[in-house]
Amino acid sequence: MQREAQTSELIAQIDDFDDQDALAKPDSEQDAQTSETLEMDIIIKTEHANEKATTTAELLLCMEKKISHVEQLYFTEHELGEKEQSLSQMEQDLIWKKKEDAGFTVKIQAPGTEPTDFQVSPLAMVQEIKQVLMDREETCRRTCFSLQLNGVTLDNFTHLRSIPGLQEGSILRVVEEPYTVREVRIHLRHIRDLLKSLNLTDGYNGVEGSSPSFLSCVTEECMEGDGLKQVSCSPPDHILPGSKKRLLVPLLPHTNFGKSSECLKVLTMSSWNPPPGNRKMHGDLLYLNVVTMEDRHFSITASTRGFYVNLSTIYSFNPKPANPSVLSHALLDLLGHISPVFKKNFSVLLKRRYARSTHPFERIATPFQVFSWTAPALDHTIDCVRAEDVSSFSLGYEEHVSAQVNTLKARDWNEELQTTRELPRKNVTDRLMRDRAVFKANSDFVSTASRGAMAVVDGNVMPVNPSEEPRQQMFIWNNIFFSLGFAVRDQYRDLGGEAAAHAAPVLDLNGVRAYWAVDQEGLYLIGTVVIDYRGYRVTAQTIVPGILERDQEQSVVYGSIDFGKTVVSDDRYLELLDKPSKKLRVQRHLVLNKDDTAVELCSSVEHKGIVGNDGRRYILDLLFTFPPDLNFLPVEGEDLNAVCQHLGFPRLHPHRLVCLRQELIDAFVEHRYQTFMETVSKSSEHDREIAKAVGTSAIKTDPITTPQLPSAIVTLPDQDTEHHSLKNVPVNNIQQGSSIKHIFSSVRNTFDIHFNPNVLCAGVRFPKESTEDIQKQKQQLKDAAVFLISNQIPAFTKSCLDHTSMPTDGVTLTEALHQHGINIRYLGTVLEYTEKKERLDHVYRIALCELITRCAKHLFKTYLLAVEPSALSASVSHFLNCFLSAFADAGVIQQNDKLASRRRSRRRRSRASVGGTVTAWSNLTPTDLWGAIKAEAQKYYHYSLPCGGVEEAVNKCRLQRITLLREIAIKTGIQILLREYHFDSEHKTVFTEEDILNIFPVVKHISPRSRDALFLLHCGQSRVQQGCLKEGCELISQALGLFTNVYGALHQDVCICLRLLGRIHYILGDYAEARGHQQRAVLISERVLGIEHPNTIQEYKHLGLYCFAGGQSVTALRLLYRARYLMLLVCGEDHPEMTLLDSKIGLVLHSMMACDLALKFLENALALTSKYQGPSSLKLAQSHHLLAKVHESKGDFRAALTHEKERYDIYRKQVGEEHEKTQESSEYLKHLTHQAVILQKTMNWICKTGSDANILPLNLNSPSRVWIMEQLNLVTGIVLIPLSSLLRKIAFIIADDIIVGL
């Protein structure tokens, strides 16, 4: 069904809830970015529409949807003028960049081929062109070549725009160059990548930025010539509604391209390497051994001129060329010459690699490694590149020392990170180059730090202080400093000991993320990565130049090194920290030094300012960046609000490093402002006019994008006491004769809320004149604490009730909580809010699963510390047996390991003891483990678990074992074998040691984002919201280009842009373009987030809709089946998201006249809609109507009448008899009644006469495609209504996960 843009005005609100999570990251980085560079940006938020507040027929079917409103930040007139000027400048920069970046076509001529056209960008470098050529089918055999223009060799790192004479139509010639040892190694790595390009082994092993993707497998055989195959309509039994089977094997579907045809048996380095001196004089570089598929053995020489077969064997060295001698510049050509099977199979491999069913996105490396928690059994094959990588990995003692002393071998990570941040940022091009360099350096640092942390834990790096006990040891490898997350020298004695030491690195990382996002010029941060691996928490940091050569007392020029007793400050640091402190709402304040002199700070005393030998000013130890959370920090003499006390706060926490989130601080300040404005508006008519004037001067409103206050604030009893300080605000201080600017200034000063991070620090003292301010700060912390309890947690539950938040697993639940400023330690409180509430049943189960698996993770960390390396697989499988089954016998597992070590090394024994007294892993029983989980839940989350074992968790709490397995595996880094696990066995262990394939690191790090691209993306969404679809599409396309320029093709922000572009094109009726964008979005989501991540499930749903709209019904069905299977695996069938999915599947099946199957899915959707929307929901009425239509198609008019009557009753009660939709339902009831009468007469006639002559035919036609598309759009949340050219009024409604335009 195509809709022409000339006949319809399709007004759409693009920004759905999913995009909210991706664009508005629940961390301080995104908040600070929004504060600084995106201040004029429009932040889209969603608000639930009142179901009964409707007056038009068009809005009726869109009830209970989210209505978007726009919230803008508040600026003075001067600030607004500055932002307008910067916006104008950015537009000019973008226009200039667009002209500069206009691509042109050149011709590439490789040896022995005709010139081919090649589209290039002036901003691209020659090296990037070479990389593209190495990936193209025609030129993939070569790696050692140069590009020449008119006989002049081009420098690899020159931008094309800087090359004189390069223009449209120029011919670039590929010229083969002599090899070096480095070039030979690059050539071998490239060949290895080509031979394994269709193999998913690297993706399962989590190396080289590889990760699996299965979209091509799901859609193969269907993307071309999509016919209606009746057999394709039926899904596997485990996908059908009501099935209790939760299979794991279908997660990684079999694909014909998963295993490529074998081309070689062996390709390795020869033992004759390196060449002797006399052979080097002949140009020999390396020697290779090859075993072909014909089982022929060859020794090959890699020389400066190319590759040839020599006469050497395993036992004799004869480097002379074999007869006949063949010299090939590319090794692949030589292999094809000596092995016909290689030539044939490699040709097939290339055809598959470049076939339409595979996409380049499946081969590109991701910037951050993604690990798969399950994998099939993999064959370990000979791989010379892998072996060389391991041998060249600097882990030995001698190499370690040289890397520590002589930094020539290692990259200076600190210098790289700081230099990239110092790059110019004057215009868009400069900022893009800077963002790109920063992102690349950071992603490389994260990758190297992760490998180094694993080497440290595995014992492959010597400590710099080997005489210290293991918990105090530190490591330096590859110019990265590694420390373990244990309490050292009583550093955290008063803060919680080991629990505080474990939490501190993540808090420090959050502080680094916050200051990184502010991006203060002249203030430097060290690169920081936190890695959890095998029970250890490792912090990897770059090294400040000179910090290891001086004592800490000599290094610190700002802050304190003795917990606030001695404090120093520095004017330059105060200047540098002024802007970040304002953005992060940190109060500038005075503290007393040990000699009672006042010292000014604008951060926590624990923040340390160090001037490195490079002259840069660094800020370190940022774990106290955000204010403390008094709900979990009992302070003697300080009583919390009655609301908190009523709920049992303050509560004891395992450590005292409890901080509020930045999202909570921002929400608290916004709430204070709204409350104040409401107080002002109620004072008098004159005050209301003043308040209105303040709002007008503060915000340049738009008739379409006027900000709206929340329609209601969910509160608890006695909440008003939290606002006592607001009620005492002297409203009358605003003089009647004040100017608008003065009024706004007064309001800003009133709500210039900042927090003193040192208020409750035990060792910090304040001057006497600050006493009153300190009391205000303490009260402000109490107000923030009660605000979290009385506002934010109820607001979260309300968002789940109206489905603006729809968590699917632990990750999305955590993101939703963080978006509301709720720390994960409140998980027990969230469970108390949601238990025994049917419409929040899905949230309760997801939160309960998250709490259980987090407690299990805490115990698993300590459990692993007592395990020797040789028993890792056995101990992990035993832990999983205790966690997920009722039978666990460690003896069964241990007896299989005949080589189990009886004696632990001294070092490993001492390191294992750092976790404290732990029961031996083999003695752990399911009862012990679940008892410990219950105790941990009570201690950490203050929640009493309703289940004492996995059986109760499954039967009583309705959790899924497969979901628990997935969550614990992701949280701990466990990778298990892909097979079906039978958890019900009472006398046999579910997991064996062979089922544990690997343990991966769980990495936490900073992910820099492109601010200019984010700005364009927000602007594009704003333009789409205003109805300017084409202009918005252009802006989002520009944002996509900038994102790709900075990150590369694989990044979540690129996925967001592609998703939005797909939706816009779908609304405009360009289904092919929509499908193309969405296909790439699915691939990126699978590669970057994971194959079963909730975002990936959403992308599959959208692609299924677009495929059906484009006429590919079978493909659409397979995509929707895939989405349903993933939903079943992740969260089960009882989830409101399953309602939309089953409705879509039912409609697609109905279009294919598979009515019996359609009924199964639609009936399940009806049951879930009734549960999660209520019996009077208009969505329930729509579900009844869909079922009525299917029953009509079957000829079952009695059932159709029953469902349609239910629909009619809901409409009549909700909107009255006279409403258009009620009348429509009434007419359909008459039609069904008429058809039923005809059918009954027919049956009576046949029974009476025994003849079927003269029978009126029944109208049992299949539904029209137009009607199916309309219903799919309604289910999805899209309403497309052609508007008259004279009608220019716009109404916006956003559905559960896509767009509604009226």
Image (spheres, rainbow, N blue to C red):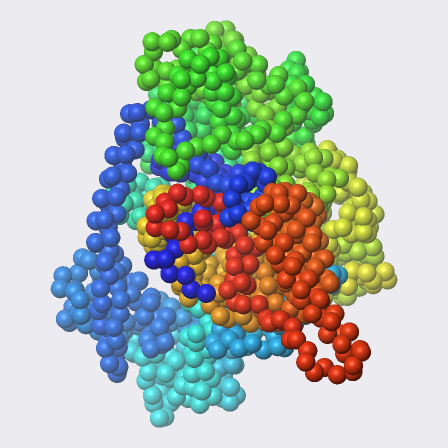
Which residue is at a point 67% across and 64% down the rendered structure image?
Answer: 1234
In terms of depth relative to the viewer, which is nearer, 868 or 796? 796
Q: Is residue 840 left or right of residue 739?
A: right
Furthest-right residue in this view: 987
Residue 631 rendering spot, x and y as whole percentages: 64, 25
Q: Estimate the x, y position of residue 930 in percent, counting from the top left.
A: 79, 46
In the displayed structure image, the side of residue 1155 where residue 96 appears, left or right: left
Quarter of the image holding residue 6?
A: bottom left
Task: Residue at 39% x, 43% y: name it.
Answer: 1289
State the residue at coordinates (37%, 83%).
Answer: 333
Residue 610 horizontal/vertical position (percent): 40, 30
Would residue 1255 be seen by someone viewing this image from the given angle? Answer: yes
Q: Quadrant of residue 792?
A: top right
Work out whether residue 1020 or residue 1129 is closer to the camera in this orientation and state it.
1020
Foreground pick, 724 / 135: 724
Mark count: 0
Q: Is residue 129 left or right of residue 1091?
A: left
Where residue 44 sits: x, y (%)? 45, 40
Please report the residue visible at 72 percent of the width from the left and 82 percent of the height from the top: 1252
Q: Is residue 871 left or right of residue 98?
A: right
**Res 36 visible:** no
Q: Is residue 1045 above or below residue 293?
A: above
